[in-house]
Structures are given as structure tokens and as C-alpha cells.
């Protein structure tokens, strides 16, 4: 009998079994880690599924949570599956996209997006805690001012579009309005008029994107300030149109010789076409990406739609129009408002937020910040935007606001009126507010969107 051979066979067998056991152990650990990672990332979504009988009945949340605005006004209240809204019809309608509707068709509304908080669920205890089965619902305090949102809705309601205002130091969104809307307490028969109610469940502030037009010239200006030597002292001729190859760029007027600052104030397409061609597609793409195009933001878990700037194939007249804010460019209102806040905040973008955490949670929550422009570039842009107001938009139209702004009139083709934009910020320490107004097919940004901004911002300052 070969004892040595037998021992070797046993050792080999044990080694193989140990290797197999080690493999399955590692597989188990990897699977466990993957599950834990998915749990922490997706648990709030899993628990909110309408099939969860602990929290839902017939698709309705069973908790007893209340949604408040920053002043303590009740926006919506849930009691064992029954949802009631603010007693004022105008407030209910103005904030429908914020609260959501009874049937949960508004996916970005608080009733859906923050259902886990309203249910009383948390990632440690789930829905059971302190021997209560299930846990009682939690209240939710938002950063929004219902009165300001209602005023914005009134100003916007003849049109389709969005208005937003936020504190560019703290990130708190004070105003969010989207039209069209409806009274969630008495919803219309949307299915009976699909054309009339097209897009009514979409919050245009968070989930829509539009051709930006001339507001995009702020991105082009930032790139020019950083990349073109002596650009502030150059002059650019404008005769009302500019030939680029076999095509042309047209302007609203013949501006003559203009500096960069004058070109921005008067929104001179010819000057910005020349500047864009000097920059080139690669540099403009770099600054569009820095400004937040091609990426969305996450607002307390709600993901915004990303604007889009793709210059991979842009050259000649297409590139020129891209720098003017046309071509295939699109912008999301909230993301562009955050870019305005970054200019105001010395180049640092503070991510907007809509949940106003209080108590212990306020010490845990951190404000997200990202530098997207140098302090020097942001300061120059701020000075130019202030000049826009003083020299073109009229200081008398924005008394006491210290407004820095840029208008946009975005051509959309198809015989439709342009989209009207007005975006910017207040250069005030006591009211560090950035804003955006966009009106679909509204016409001139300076004539249509600017008055809406003026009314809303004056209310924000007068009733802090």
C-alpha cells in the first residue's frame, strides 16, 4: 500500500473542497455586498411600490403625513389613503406640480417623490419602529413659499412655461411654478381632452428643456473671457447680418462696432457668431459642460432633465448659431437657474433643494457645492449682466432689486413664436436670489418674460 500516495490524494481532495468552499464563500460575500448596496440605493423605491400592503391600499398611501410650505401653510395632508389639499383653490392649482395629484400622475410631486418620508419609513427601522406597527407617518416641510408660488402661477398662467427662484447661498428653492396646471382636489377629465391637457402632468421647471436662445450667450461669454486674449477690448462689426461660408447669421438690428459687453447687452448675433468661431467647437463644448448642460441635477432625490449641447459635428454657420444659443441646443430651466446662481456666488454652484429639514436632520444634511467658474470670470459676468439691466432692460423696471440678468428670444421654427426667457439674480446680500422665467412661444424675452420676473422678485423681497 502506497501510504504517501494516499496522503497526497487526501490532501488534494481537501484542497479542492477548500477551494470550492472558498469560491462559494466569496460568491456569497459579493452577493451580500451587492444586495446591501442595492438596498441602500433602492430601498426607498422598493418600499414605495403600490403593491406594499403595509403602506398602500388600492394604490393610495395609508400614512398620516402632512406637507407644509416654509411658512407652515398646509399644502397637502394624507389620512389613511385620503388626500386633502390647501383650502384655497388658487394655491392648490399653483402648487399641484409640487404636491402631486390624487392619482399620482405627477412623478416629481412630493406625494410620489417623498412617499417614503410621508410614510414614516426609514432605512434602519423600515416602517416598524418603537413597537408601533406600522410607524406613524412623518410630516414634510418644503423650502417653498406658497404665496410666492401662487403669485408666479398667476403671472405665468396665460402661458405655458415655468418660473423658479432660489437662494444661491443656501440652495433653498423659494418659488417653483409650472403651467398648465389644474386643481388637484377637482381634477379635470384629462383623457377626454388630450390636446388641451398635453404635458399637464410634467413639471416644466424640473422636467422640460427648451431652446435657450440668447441666454446661452452667457456661456459663450464665459468661454471668451477665459480663452480669447484681450477679448474685452476688442470690437466686433455688426451690419445686421454676417456671411459664414455659403450661409448667414442674422441680427435683430445693425449694431455697428460693439465690444463684448455691448454685444451681450444688445444680444448681437453677429458679434457672438464671430466670437464663437474664434473659440471653436471644443472650447465652447467645454464651457457648456461646465455650465451644467448634458447633465441633470438631483434635487433631494428628484432628478432633473438635462439640457443638451452637442457640438461634435458643428462647424461653420451651425457652430456660430450654437454659440448664439440656437442650433440643437436645449436648456432645462432649473439647471440654468443654478448656473445663474453660480455666477452670483463667485463661480460656485450650490445645488438647489426643496426639502427644508429641521431639528436633528438639519445637522446631518450638507449643501452640495461645485466650482464651475473662476471668481474672476464670475465677477466679470456679473458686471456685464448688471450693465444689461442698467443700459437695456431699464433699472426703473426693477427698482431696488440690484438686478443682473440676460434675456433670451429663442427661435423654434415651424411658424411658432419664439420661447421667451429671462434669467439672472439679485446682487444683494440680504436677498441672494437667482431666478429663471421661460414662456413657451411667448415672443420677446425682454418684453414678455422680464415683467413676470420683476413681479415675482419684488414679491420675494417685499414679503421675505
Image (cartoon, rainbow, N blue to C red):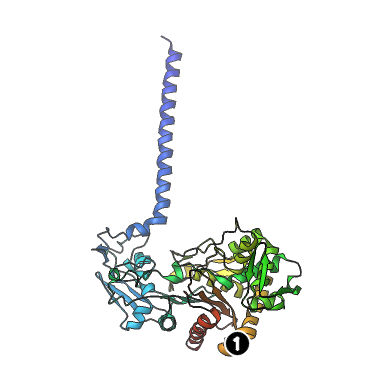
Q: Is residue 355 above or below residue 404?
A: above
Residue farthest along the top direction in this orientation: 1
Task: Name the quadrant containing residue 386.
Answer: bottom right
- Residue under the point 26% across and 61% down: 54
Q: How many other residues sit within 10 Å of disc 1, few (<14), some (14-19) or many (≥20)?
A: few
Residue farthest along the front direction in this orientation: 246
The residue tagged 1 is: 394
Residue 118, visible in the rendered structure? yes
Q: Secondary structure at mark 1?
A: loop
Q: Is residue 109 above or below residue 9?
A: below
Residue 390 is situated, as x and y percent measured from the top left of the image, at: 63, 85
| Count of numbered circles on the image | 1
Front residue (pair 107, 330): 330
Residue 311 is situated, as x and y percent measured from the top left of the image, at: 60, 59
What is the quadrant of the N terminus in the image?
A: top left
Going by the image, does 100 lie left or right of 448? left
Front residue (pair 149, 346): 149
- Residue under the point 76% across and 74% down: 233
Task: Name the quadrant containing residue 181.
Answer: bottom left
Front residue (pair 378, 117): 378
Residue 374, visible in the rendered structure? no
Residue 381 is situated, as x and y percent measured from the top left of the image, at: 65, 74
Residue 36 is situated, as x and y percent measured from the top left of the image, at: 41, 51
Amino acid at each position: 500500500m502506497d501510504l504517501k500516495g494516499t496522503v497526497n490524494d487526501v490532501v488534494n481532495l481537501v484542497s479542492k473542497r477548500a477551494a470550492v468552499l472558498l469560491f462559494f464563500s466569496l460568491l456569497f460575500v459579493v452577493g451580500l455586498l451587492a444586495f446591501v448596496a442595492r438596498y441602500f440605493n433602492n430601498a426607498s423605491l422598493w418600499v414605495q411600490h403600490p403593491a406594499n400592503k403595509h403602506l398602500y391600499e388600492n394604490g393610495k398611501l395609508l400614512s398620516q403625513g402632512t406637507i407644509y410650505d416654509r411658512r407652515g401653510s398646509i399644502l397637502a395632508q394624507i389620512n389613511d389613503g385620503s388626500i386633502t389639499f390647501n383650502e384655497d383653490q388658487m394655491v392648490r392649482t399653483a402648487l399641484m406640480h409640487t404636491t402631486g395629484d390624487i392619482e399620482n400622475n405627477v412623478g416629481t410631486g412630493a406625494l410620489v417623490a417623498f412617499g417614503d418620508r410621508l410614510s414614516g419609513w426609514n432605512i434602519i427601522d423600515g416602517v416598524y419602529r418603537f413597537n408601533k406597527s406600522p410607524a406613524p407617518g412623518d410630516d414634510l416641510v418644503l423650502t417653498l413659499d406658497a404665496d410666492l408660488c401662487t403669485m408666479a402661477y398667476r403671472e405665468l398662467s396665460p402661458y405655458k412655461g415655468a418660473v423658479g427662484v432660489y437662494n444661491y447661498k443656501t440652495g433653498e428653492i423659494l418659488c417653483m411654478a409650472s403651467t398648465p396646471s389644474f386643481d388637484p382636489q377637482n381634477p379635470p377629465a384629462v383623457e377626454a381632452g388630450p390636446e388641451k391637457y398635453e404635458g399637464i402632468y410634467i413639471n416644466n421647471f424640473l422636467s422640460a428643456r427648451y431652446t435657450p436662445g440668447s441666454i446661452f450667450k452667457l456661456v459663450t461669454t464665459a468661454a471668451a473671457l477665459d480663452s480669447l486674449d484681450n477679448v474685452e477690448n476688442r470690437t466686433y462689426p455688426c451690419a445686421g447680418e454676417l456671411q459664414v461660408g455659403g450661409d448667414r447669421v442674422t441680427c435683430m438690428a445693425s449694431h455697428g462696432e460693439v465690444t463684448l459687453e455691448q454685444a451681450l447687452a444688445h444680444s448681437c448675433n453677429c458679434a457672438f457668431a464671430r466670437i464663437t468661431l474664434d473659440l471653436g467647437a471644443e472650447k465652447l463644448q467645454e464651457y457648456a459642460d461646465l455650465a451644467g448642460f448634458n447633465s441633470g441635477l438631483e434635487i433631494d432625490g428628484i432628478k432633473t432633465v438635462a439640457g443638451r449641447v452637442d457640438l461634435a459635428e458643428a462647424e461653420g454657420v451651425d457652430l456660430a448659431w450654437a454659440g448664439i444659443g440656437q442650433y440643437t441646443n436645449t436648456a432645462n430651466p432649473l439647471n440654468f437657474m443654478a448656473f445663474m446662481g453660480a455666477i452670483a456666488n463667485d463661480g460656485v454652484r450650490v445645488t438647489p433643494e426643496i426639502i427644508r429639514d429641521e431639528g436633528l436632520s438639519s445637522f446631518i444634511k450638507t449643501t452640495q457645492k461645485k466650482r464651475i467658474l473662476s471668481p474672476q470670470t464670475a465677477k466679470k459676468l456679473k458686471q456685464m449682466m448688471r450693465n444689461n439691466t442698467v443700459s437695456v432692460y431699464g433699472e426703473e423696471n426693477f427698482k431696488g432689486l440690484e438686478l443682473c440678468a440676460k434675456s433670451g428670444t429663442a427661435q423654434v421654427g415651424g411658424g411658432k413664436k419664439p420661447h421667451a426667457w429671462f434669467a439672472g439674480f439679485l446682487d444683494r446680500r440680504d436677498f441672494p436670489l437667482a431666478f429663471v422665467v421661460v414662456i413657451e412661444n411667448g415672443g420677446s424675452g425682454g418684453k414678455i418674460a422680464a415683467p413676470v420676473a420683476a413681479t415675482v422678485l419684488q414679491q420675494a423681497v417685499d414679503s421675505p
